[in-house]
Amino acid sequence: MRRGKAGGFFLILLALGLPVHSAEAGAAETADTAGNPLILSPDEAVRRALDSSLNLKKSLIDLSGAEYRAKRLWSELFPAITGSAGTGYSSALFTGDGFSADEKNVGFSTGLGITLGFNAGIPYAMKNIRLAYQARLLSYEDARSQLEIQVIKNFYGLIADRENLNFLEETLKLAEQQLDKNRIAFNNGLVRELVVLQGRLGVETARYNLSAARSAYLNGMGEFLALLGVEPDTEALLEGNMDVVRIEADPELLVRDYLPRRPDIMGRRQEIERLENAEKQTLLSSKAPSLSLSARWEGRDIDPFADVLSGTASVNIPIDPWIPGTAKDQALRTAKADVEKAKLDLKSAEDSAAAQIRSLAANLRNSWDSIEIARLSLEVAERTHELAEQGFRNGTVESLSLEDARNSLADARQRLLRSKLAYQTMTLDLAAALNINWKDFLNNPPGTPPEIPEAPRDFRSKQ
């Protein structure tokens, strides 16, 4: 609902047995404040859920760590630096004058060493560090999208439950009005006592159905508010209704344009790239020569002071990785096999994702047909109830038939509401399958063929 339709909120509050507040205050508030209900729009619900999600916060910590490492690739080339300091004592034991305690025999030493190693696999290790950050970022964005879809599904589920409460409230009012008419007719001797009893049963049944639905709605609202990080007992109202828009999407066009953008497909491609880099890193680290440079300075004693500076450079040429069957050769074969398996996993994921998109698009068309049938059924039920009421007043229709017509009307309303909710849920599932923002998808669905202008009514009548 829009803010201008604040009057609809009062009907909802009355249906739930909640206190009614000022329309101006309720429409102006978007947060729970003293004396005013918390008004939640879909965007506000999503924002609160994203801000309060502990899993997203944990994922963000992992993402920050991966970003920190990706921005400091120089650490892969940074040398190992060590410092040392020590003291010692030396003295003869069995020769000369034997052991003696003399401060001149105390020695001190300090040292500083630097070791730098190079191998041909370092560039690919750096690439995998960047890929690890991209994978974390993709995982974080996907988690956000999944949470948004979950929140919106729950949101519209509660909207449907709320509208169902209105239907049940109206059903109860119809039953109570009919009971009053039956009592008046009974007092005037126009109907039997059984008719009044049947009317009372209808009223109690309608009241029980309303009470059960109200309890389920309040429980669902409490769970939803907890998901948003709001106290479950907070008084809240939802902005919106169950209006759905027909989406005619071309599944093949969606598969072609949006399949590569799915997080799982992108993740599979990143995994292939990571494994390929790991294979090259293992190959070059194992078979290519490596260069090692080291330098060390040491200072000894204090009086007289003496120091020494030493340095080494060495080239290591591996031999065993070139021999088939060795442990390092087997490691190279395993790395190559991992790449091939990852490519097969990508193909399987693409086939599964394409089938999911095609299935959702087809089910979406069928779901709209279900809505059309439910609307037609509601029209029939409404007309049947009107005729049953007229017949009952004229004495040609029994009270049981009127009650059956009233129950059929309630069922038809609920059937249409369930069909709309199923269509909305399926639409959100398709948006998630295409990795499209749910709001953008609902407002401007992709892959929808242009509408063919309808022929003027005069022209159609001539045909």
Image (spheres, rainbow, N blue to C red):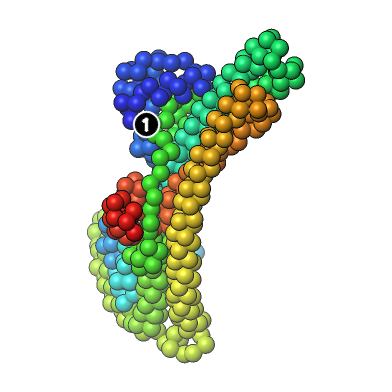
Q: Amino acid at mark 1?
A: Met
In the displayed structure, does residue 36 sit left or right of residue 450? Answer: right
Q: In the displayed structure, would residue 375 be above or below residue 80?
A: above
Mark 1 closeness class: few <14, some 14–19, many ≥20 residues within 10 Å? few
Image check: 374 left or right of 453? right
The answer, for residue 250, to whether it is visible in the render is yes
Across the whole image, how many numbered discs are drawn on residues? 1
Up the image or down, 155 lies above or below 340; here it is above
Q: Position of residue 330 (x, y in %)?
A: 50, 82
Residue 377 higher or lower than 308, as above or below: above
Q: Position of residue 275 (x, y in %)?
A: 41, 72
Q: Which residue: 65% across, 17% down?
A: 182
Q: Which one is nearer the viewer's eye here, 57 or 93?
A: 57
Which of the image's four quarters has the C terminus?
A: bottom left
Q: Nearer the viewer, residue 174 or 182?
A: 182
Q: Residue at x 42, y 30 (%)?
A: 238
The image quarter containing residue 358 is bottom left
Q: Position of residue 204 (x, y in %)?
A: 67, 22
- Residue 117 image-quadrant placement: bottom left
Is 143 situated left or right of 213 in this image?
Answer: left
Q: Secondary structure at mark 1?
A: loop
Q: Nearer the viewer, residue 249 or 321?
A: 249
Outermost front residue: 462
User: Which residue sits at x=37%, y=31%?
Assistant: 1
The residue at which mark 1 appears reads as 1
Q: Quadrant of residue 34?
A: top left
Residue nearest the observer in this picture, 198 or 141? 198
Identify the residue at horizontal 52%, vertical 18% (top origin).
17
The answer, for residue 54, to whether it is visible in the render is no
Q: What is the x, y in percent for residue 253?
A: 35, 66
